[in-house]
Amino acid sequence: MPDQEKYNKADPLADAGTEEEEIQSAVESRTFDLGTMEAQTLIKNERLDDEPEVAAADDRVKPRSLWQDAWRDLRRNPIFIISGLLIIFLVVMAIWPGLFTSTDPLKCDLSKAQQGSESGHPFGFDGQGCDVYARTVYGARASITVGVCATVGAALVGTTLGGLAGFLGGWSDSVISRVADIFFGIPILLGGLVFLSVIPSRSIWIVVAFIVVLGWPQIARIGRGAVITAKQQDYVTAARALGASNSRLMLRHILPNAVAPIIVVATIALGTYIALEATLSFLGVGLKPPTVSWGIDISSASATFRNAPHMLLYPAGALSITVLAFIMLGDAVRDALDPKLR
Amino acid sequence: MGRYVIRRLLQMIPVFLGSTFLIFVMVHALGDPVNALFGDRAPDPVVAAQIRKQYNLDEPLWLQYLIYMGNLFRWDFGTTFNGQSVTSLLATAYPATIKLTAVAFTIEVIFGVGFGLISGLRRGGWSDNTVLIFTLIVISIPTFVTGYVLQYLVGVQWGILPATAGEDLTLESLLLPGIVLASVSLAYVARLTRTTVAENSRADFVRTAVAKGLPRRRVVLNHLLRNSLIPVVTFLGADLGALMGGALVTERIFNIHGVGFYLYQGIVRQNTATVVGFVTILIIIYLAANLLVDLLYAVLDPRIRYA
C-alpha cells in the first residue's frame, strides 16, 4: 500500500498546524468579512463572464438534479401522459360534476327502478330509480377526496415519524418503530369493521382519519429506511461539520434526498386507498347515504346484480379506472425516479 | 439461531400487547354491552349489576384488560353473553377461514411466482406484456367487484363451479372464492417476482451457471429463482395476515361462515369477547407468519446468518 507508507513517512503533526490555521482564517473570513467574500464571488462571476467559451461548456454539461431527470423521463412516457390526463379528467369531474351532467343524483323516480338505458339516461337507473350516470359522475368526488386526503395525511404523519425515527435512532427509533408495528399488526379491513362501527358519524373525514391512522406505518417504514440511507452520505457529514443545526440538516439536506421513495409509495397507496374506501362502504362501515359514492352504489347494486348488472358495472368500472390511473401514475413515477428497476 | 428467535419473540410482546389493547379499547367504546343485551327494554338494575359483575364489566378498563390477558394464557377467551365459550366459536369459525386462506395462498404462490418467472425471463416479449397488463387490471378492480362478477359468470351463467360454498366446504366449492381472494395478491406477487427475476437474470452467478454448461432448467430453478425469492417471501408472509383479514369480504359474497361472519355478528350484537378473541388470534397468526419469514431467509440464502 504505497499511500499508507507515504502517510507514515510524512509527519502528521507538520500538516496539522497549517490546516488549523487555514480553518481559522476561513472562519474569520466568514464571520467578519462577509463583504469581502461577496465581492470575491462577484469577481469570480465576472471572471467567468470574461471567458464565454468556458461558460458555454459549463452550460452544456450542466448537471441535472434527480427531479429534472425524472421530469424529462416522465414527459416522454406514454403511461404517464395517459394516466395524467385521466387523473386531470377525474379531478375536474370531482370538482365540477355539473359540467358532465345536469341530472340531480338524488332525484329519483321509483317507477323507473332497475330500468336499462334510455335517451338522456345513458347508464340506466338504479334500484331506487336514480340516474346511474349522474350518480357515477357525482361519486368521483367522495372517492377522490378520500383518496387524496388520506394519502396526504398518511404521507405527512408517516414521513414525520419515520424520518424522526431514522434521524434520531436509539430509543426514539425503537419506540416509533414498535408503535408502527402495533398499527401494522391490525388487519386493515378488520380494524375498519371494528373502529368505524364505534363512531356513529360517517362523514368523509372519519373515513380519511381511519385510513391515515392505519396507513401511516407503511410510509413511515419506507421513510425511515430512506432517511437512514441519506443520513450516512458525505454531504450530511460535511453539513454537520460546518455547524448546521439538526433541523437544518433534516429539512435542507436529508429530506429532499429521502423523499423520492416516499412519493412513489404514496402515489401507489392513493389508488389502493380509493379501493379501500369502496370496500369499507361495501361492508357497511364506510360512507353512508346521502353521500354519493361508488362504494355505496356498488354495495346496494350487488343484491340485484343478476337482474340488473348495469347498476353495478358502471360505478365499478369508474372505480377501477380511477384506481388504475393512480397505480399507473405511481408506476411511471417509480420508473422515472428509480431507473434501476426498469 | 435460537437467540435470534428468542429476541424476535421478545420484540413481539409489546406489539402484541399494544395491538390487542387498542382493539380492546375500541370494542369497549362500542357502547354498553349490557344495555345492548337487553335491546329496547330497560334492564333491571340488579340484573344488570350482576351481569356486569359476572363479566368484570364493573372494573376499570385496564384491569379488565389484565384479567382478559391472564385468562388468555390459559387458552380461555371468555364467554359470550349467551353462554357460548368464545373458544368453541373460534373452533367453528377458524377452520372455514383457514381452508379458504390455504386455497387462496396456494393459488397465489403457484400462479403468482409462475407468471412472474415467465414474465421476468421473457422481458419485453408478448407474454411479459400480457402479464403486466393483466396484473394491472386485476389490481385495479376491487375484490368485491371481482367476486360478484366471477360468481355470476362462472357460478351462475356457465355453471362450472358452485356459486356459493354454504355449510360443508369442499375443495371444489372453495376454488372460486379462493381465486377471488387470491387475485389481487397474486398480481402483486407476479409483479414482484418479475422485477427480481429480471434483475437477477443479469447477475454474475447466473452467467457463471450458464457458462458451466448447466441445463437451463437447473439454472432457472436452482440459481435464478432461489435467489429471487427473498423479497417475494417477505411479501407473502405479510400477506398471509392480510388474506385472512380480507377473507371477510369473500366470505360474505360466497356465504362462507368463517371469521368474517362471526366477527360481524359480534360487532352487531356488541359482543366484546367475540370481537377481541377473533382479532387476537388474527394478530397472533400475523406475527407468527412474519417470524417464519425471517427464519426462511436463512434457508433461501445461506449467506444470511442469525447472530
Image (cartoon, coloured by chain):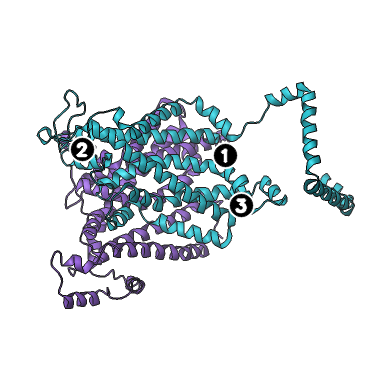
Chain colours: A cyan, B purple
CA–CA distance between discs 2 and 3? 51 Å
Q: Is residue A228 positioned above or below A145 on the image?
A: below
Badge 3: chain ID: A
Q: Earlier in the sequence, mark 2 or mark 3?
A: 2
Towards the viewer: A262 or B95: A262
Label 1 environment density (alpha carbons within 10 Å; few <14, some 14–19, many ≥20): some
Q: Quadrant of the C terminus of chain B?
A: bottom right
Number of the front mark, 1 or 2: 2
* Residue B36 seen in the figure: yes
Residue receiving disc 3: A247
Label 2 environment density (alpha carbons within 10 Å; few <14, some 14–19, many ≥20): some
Would you say A117 lies left or right of A199 here? Answer: left
Would you say A296 lies left or right of A68 here? Answer: left
CA–CA distance between discs 1 and 2? 64 Å
Residue receiving disc 2: A106
- Residue B196: x and y in percent read 49, 39
> Which type of secondary structure does the marked residue at label 2 adopt?
loop
The label on residue B205 is 1
**Three-letter amino acid code at the position of disc 1:** Phe
